[in-house]
Amino acid sequence: DQQVKQNSPSLSVQEGRISILNCDYTNSMFDYFLWYKKYPAEGPTFLISISSIKDKNEDGRFTVFLNKSAKHLSLHIVPSQPGDSAVYFCAAIIIQGAQKLVFGQGTRLTINP
Amino acid sequence: DAGVIQSPRHEVTEMGQEVTLRCKPISGHNSLFWYRQTMMRGLELLIYFNNNVPIDDSGMPEDRFSAKMPNASFSTLKIQPSEPRDSAVYFCASSPRNTIYFGEGSWLTVV
């Protein structure tokens, strides 16, 4: 049962343009949603998160939007830079009781100069 | 803070050998997770501990895998006997509450 899904395995964007990474989930009990960025040969790095009671969180070039009715979230990167090329994982967590972070399959973002 | 520390970073071992991966979580974090990443399955949760107690080990592939957390600052993931299909990157992560921090991973190759 894939509770968190990233349906696009890859995305290619021109430098300076906006990158939009999408994620869908099925469990309405998730409290937080997180985005991680992963370079080859490194562990995932936490990027940005959003509480389930909010619909937007912004941090510099990164903005995460949450649409609870559609059970959909997206990560916007603007402007995109070559250093943003990496695999991006969407994740979700339930805070109450024992924690369990559920990951999507990842989207490989390539920023073209 | 040194972050989550994993060892070894790389290991190549022969099929049938025992493999032990080690993890030191960030001090003060009460949850610890072991993940495995493969090309076929992506990032999957193997087991996680809360206050040193295993909470959910449903992701552990089979009896050849075992994990321990004898104290708040150390955990091991053991594979015995190892098989070529165990080749993957194994990540340890720790969490204080609602964000999880990953180590750099242990790259395992079983030949």
Image (cartoon, grey):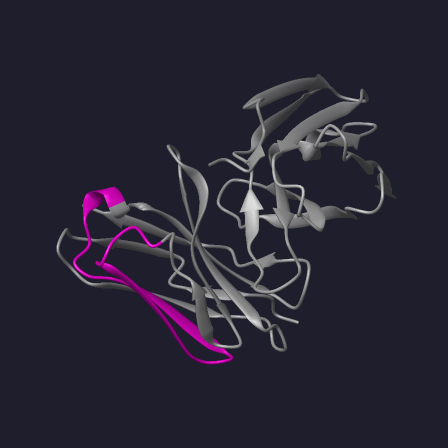
**Is residue A76 covered in magenta?**
no
Q: Looking at the rendering, which quadrant does residue B98 occupy? A: bottom right
The C terminus of chain A: image quadrant: top right
Left/right placement of residue B26 relative to residue B48 reads right
**Residue at left 53%, top 48%?**
A42
Q: Is residue A52 above or below residue B106?
A: above
Q: Is residue A111 above or below residue A32?
A: above
Left/right placement of residue B15 relative to residue A9 reads left
Of B44 and B74, nearer the camera is B44
Of A93 and B42, nearer the camera is A93
Left/right placement of residue B51 relative to residue B17 reads right
**Is residue B68 covered in magenta?**
yes
**Residue at left 81%, top 22%?**
A16
Residue A69 in the image, given as x and y percentages of width and height: 77, 31
Q: Looking at the rendering, which quadrant does residue A25 occupy? A: top right
Residue B72 in the image, given as x and y percentages of width and height: 51, 80
Of A59 and A64, nearer the camera is A64
* Residues drawn in magenta: B60-85
**Residue at left 40%, top 36%?**
B41
Q: Is residue A59 visible?
A: no
Q: Looking at the rendering, which quadrant does residue B25 occupy? A: bottom right
**Residue at left 70%, top 29%?**
A82
Residue A63 in the image, given as x and y percentages of width and height: 82, 37
